[in-house]
């Protein structure tokens, strides 16, 4: 279970309408948590709304852009009025723009695109973590999980420099917030997925994923469910002594 009898049972999951985020929503639902799903993908949001949920867990799907503070305020208002104070925040939304399925070289990257990726992947997590804190502080309990990437550890081979920098930034955000929020019973952790089979990872040539596979001792690419179970643990009461940590969930392709 996430939370105790007195602890919160409301989570916000960004980028939660598909891929890794959708699996996280299912995992939290199975643990009896109500979830507000934030996404910008209309089709995925529709599918998310239509999905059957386990008894005892409800899901609200909201179209909102995590890079916009006004959108965050709207999302949190909705979450509080639907389910009460927010106890779990999973900053999962992320983008990795490519050109014809290939990374854009740093020397050719438009500054606008750099700003856009940083705004979604890093600033979005900052805004959410900032605005949700009063709920968690008042309850004396909270869990923030930031979905970074193995690229934060190794540098990005397939994604652009904006992506690699934004994900490395998430690890700094995680550790710094862990210091600030820890005294209030709020943990802040990061997960660094390796290669996970989602639309994002399938947006490149197949040989790229085959190359990744060759470096994975476990012998397969990851699934969204592999990531969701790690997040489920970090969001639970049982993980109360884990904070500022980076959990490498990659089948062994990078061992820190
Ligand atoms: P995904 O399949 O592309 O799903 C991400 C979802 O987030 C999409 O529905 C996307 O909508 C949405 N989104 C994009 N920008 C948003 C915004 N500004 N506000 C709200 N939602 C937004 O990605 P995924 O593979 O599940 O990845 C989830 C997270 O894991 C990302 O942070 C990613 O960087 C990280 N990750 C993934 C892998 C992997 O191999 N898949 C590896 C390492 C890390 P649109 O479709 O409209 O963009």
Image (cartoon, rainbow, N blue to C red):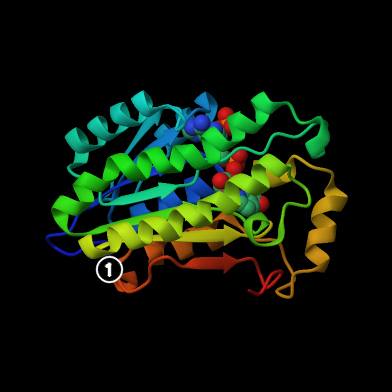
**Front position in the image: 8 or 103:** 103
Q: The C terminus lies in which quarter of the figure?
A: bottom right
Q: Residue at x 38, y 67 (%)?
A: 243
- The image quadrant where one finds ligand 1 is top right
Does residue 229 sit above or below 68 in this rendering? Answer: below
Q: Residue at x 82, y 35 (%)?
A: 107
The image shows residue 167 at horizontal and vertical percentages of 59, 50
Number of marks present in the image shown:
1
Where does label 1 land, which residue?
A: 237
The image shows residue 52 at horizontal and vertical percentages of 39, 42
Q: Residue at x 34, y 62 (%)?
A: 179
Q: Is residue 216 left or right of residue 56?
A: right
Question: In this orientation, does residue 214 appear?
Answer: yes
Q: Residue furthest right?
A: 207
Does residue 247 sit above or below 60 in this rendering? Answer: below
**Front position in the image: 11 or 142:** 142
Q: Residue at x 41, y 35 (%)?
A: 38
Dot 1 crowding, Cα within 10 Å, few <14, some 14–19, many 20+ = some
The image shows residue 47 at horizontal and vertical percentages of 48, 33
- Give the quarter of the image for residue 144: bottom left
Is the CB of the residue bearing disc 1 within 8 angstroms of ligand 1? Answer: no
Q: The N terminus lies in which quarter of the figure?
A: bottom left
The image shows residue 93 at horizontal and vertical percentages of 51, 41
- Give the quarter of the image for residue 117: top right
Does residue 221 sit above or below 22 in this rendering? Answer: below
Q: Considering the numbered disc 1 on the image, is that residue within a helix, a strand or a loop? A: helix
Does residue 196 sit above or below 119 in this rendering? Answer: below
Question: In this orientation, does residue 58 appear?
Answer: no
Q: Is residue 14 left or right of residue 32?
A: right
């Amino acid at each position: 279970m996430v939370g105790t009898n007195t602890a919160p049972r409301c989570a916000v999951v960004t980028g939660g309408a598909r891929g890794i985020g959708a699996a996280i929503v299912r995992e939290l639902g199975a643990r009896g948590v109500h979830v507000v799903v934030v996404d910008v993908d209309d089709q995925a949001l529709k599918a998310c709304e239509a999905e059957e949920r386990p008894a005892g867990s409800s899901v609200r799907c909201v179209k909102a852009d995590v890079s916009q503070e006004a959108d965050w305020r709207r999302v949190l208002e909705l979450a509080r009025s639907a389910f009460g104070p927010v106890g779990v925040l999973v900053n999962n939304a992320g983008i990795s723009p490519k050109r014809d399925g290939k990374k854009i070289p740093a020397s050719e990257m438009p500054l606008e695109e750099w700003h856009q990726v940083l705004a979604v992947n890093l600033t979005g997590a900052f805004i959410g973590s900032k605005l949700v804190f009063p709920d968690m502080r008042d309850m004396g309990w909270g869990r923030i999980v930031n979905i970074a990437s193995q690229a934060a550890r190794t540098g990005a081979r397939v994604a652009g420099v904006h992506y690699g920098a934004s994900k490395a930034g998430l690890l700094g955000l995680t550790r710094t917030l862990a210091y600030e929020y820890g005294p209030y019973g709020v943990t802040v952790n990061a997960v660094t997925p390796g290669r996970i089979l989602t639309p994002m990872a399938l947006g490149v040539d197949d040989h790229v994923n085959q190359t990744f596979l060759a470096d994975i001792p476990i012998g397969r690419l990851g699934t969204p469910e592999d990531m969701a179970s790690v997040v489920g643990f970090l969001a639970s009461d049982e993980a109360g002594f884990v904070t500022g940590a980076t959990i490498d969930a990659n089948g062994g392709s990078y061992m820190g």
